[in-house]
Image: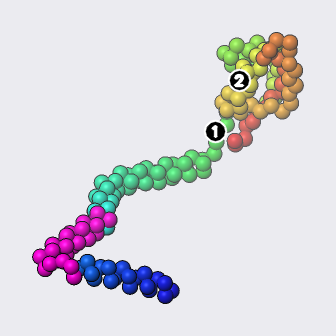
Amino acid sequence: MSKLKDTIKGWRAGADSFWSARTEQERRMLAIGGTVVALGLIYGLLIDPALTGREKLRRELPLLRQEAAELQALASQAAQMSAAPATPPAPLSREALNTALAGRGLTPQNVVATGDYFKIDFKNVPFAGLVTWLDEARRENRLAVTEGTVSAQDAAGMVDATLTLRQETGSR
């Protein structure tokens, strides 16, 4: 602690000797220059950022309020939609199922429809196309695979598959 005091005393002695070596006119000019530099630092570090930030917020606040109102409207709409019961899908017929499969380029060997259940046999179909169709059928018709067997073929990407699907009639 005394070392720090000695250092400060040394700086003060150096500053006092510097100041006493200056004429009255030089002292006035140094004081004015120091004041101008201090005011510039205060403005540059404190006042200008505050004024700039205030102006930026003044410009952005209406847009942020509008976005908040839109988000609240979307949230209330989502709450209303989640409270409403999901509409059940239209019952899927064997013909509609065959049409959907043909639209994806899939040709089943056999399709058996019993109530909400469908049993489909595929021979040598592209796996990617089968999976894409299953995902589409799940989203659009609420078809779920209740049982399935898929076996790879010699040709890359080709499979044989036997699927049992059920159309869900309840909510998602």
Q: State the CA–CA distance, disc 2 to disc 1.
A: 22 Å
Magenta segment: 20-45
Query: Is residue 58 shown above or below 137?
Result: below
Q: Residue type at mark 1: give it.
A: Thr
Query: Is residue 118 shown above or below 6?
Result: above
Q: Residue at coordinates 86% horizontally, 27% vertically from top-left?
A: 148
* Mark 2 vs 1: CB contact within 8 A: no
Residue of label 1: 87
| SS at circle 2 | helix
Quadrant of the rendered image containing residue 105: top right
Task: Give residue 133's mark.
Answer: 2
Q: Residue at coordinates 21% horizontally, 79% vertically from top-left?
A: 21
Query: Which circle, 2 or 1, is nearer the viewer?
Result: 2
- Is residue 32 located in the magenta-colored stretch of the structure? yes
Q: Can you name the residue that lies furthest to the bottom here?
A: 2
Q: Residue at coordinates 60% horizontally, 50% vertically from top-left?
A: 83
Query: Is residue 12 shown above or below 94?
Result: below
Quadrant of the rendered image containing residue 13: bottom left
Between 169 and 5, the residue placed more toward the observer is 5
Image quadrant for the C terminus?
top right
Mark 1 Cα within 10 Å, few/some/many (few <14, many 20+)?
few
| SS at circle 1 | loop
Between 144 and 161, the residue placed more toward the observer is 161
Mark 2 Cα within 10 Å, few/some/many (few <14, many 20+)?
some
